[in-house]
Image: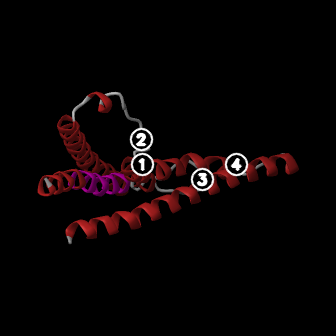
Amino acid sequence: MLMSLLRFINKVLLKLTYSLAMTIVAITIMALCLSALTRFVSGTGYDWLIELPPVLVCWLVFPLLGPLLKEGSHIKVDFLSSNLSERQHYFIKIFVNVIILAASLVFLKAGIDATLLYFRLGQLMELELDIPIWWMYLSFPVGFAIMTLFSIELLLDVLINDVEKKNTN
């Protein structure tokens, strides 16, 4: 029951995260193309069109951490898995997923602290657009909250699959 709820939540988060990522990439491409076009046509451009893509990068990177982890699209080393026994492979999966979960929780806490600090300071970015700094920092705890949920699912998957293997043998 709990596992199916977690899988459902993560499936929704996966779709939302990929939709957000595609939207950000589209906005980035359109902003840069529009900036080049306006500079070519008029000789001057709008600074905010150039400043917007770097601001959006944090919202592209951090929320994608969990989905990329689950799909195995992150950077990893595969040479160990071919040289390990099934039992050793099982323990390494548990070890890696526990480390990822612990790191996600640490970074989630740090992200919340940083976001709250910049929210209280009320500072704005020095851009043509008045964007609060805390808005960029908010991507950090959001991304690591998503990664925490995905790492819990991966850890439980490893544990549940081991129990099911033992029950069938």
Disc 2 vs disc 1: Cβ atoms closer than 8 Å?
yes
Q: Indicate which label's residue lies in the foreground, 2 or 4.
A: 2
Q: Magenta segment range?
A: 142-156
Q: What is the C-alpha distance between the residues marked 2 and 4? A: 27 Å
Q: What is the C-alpha distance between the residues marked 3 and 4? A: 11 Å
**Up/down of 89 relative to 109, above or below:** above
The disc, 2 or 1, on the residue closer to the chain's N-terminal end is 1
Q: Amino acid at mark 3?
A: Val
Q: Amino acid at mark 1?
A: Leu
Total numbered labels: 4
Q: Dot 1: what SS?
A: helix
Given the current orientation, which residue lies at the most extreme front position?
Answer: 169
Q: Which residue is mark 2?
A: 74
Give whichever of 41, 64 is nearer the camera: 64
The disc, 3 or 4, on the residue closer to the chain's N-terminal end is 3
Dot 3 surroundings within 10 Å: few (below 14), some, or many (20 or more)? some
Q: Which residue is mark 1?
A: 68
Residue 154 on the magenta segment = yes
Determine which of the numbered discs, if any, sits on residue 32 in the image. Answer: 4
Q: Which residue is mark 3?
A: 25
Dot 4 surroundings within 10 Å: few (below 14), some, or many (20 or more)? some
Q: What is the C-alpha distance between the residues marked 2 and 3? A: 19 Å
Disc 2 vs disc 3: Cβ atoms closer than 8 Å?
no
- Left or right relative to 13: residue 162: left
The disc, 1 or 3, on the residue closer to the chain's N-terminal end is 3
Q: Dot 4: what SS?
A: helix
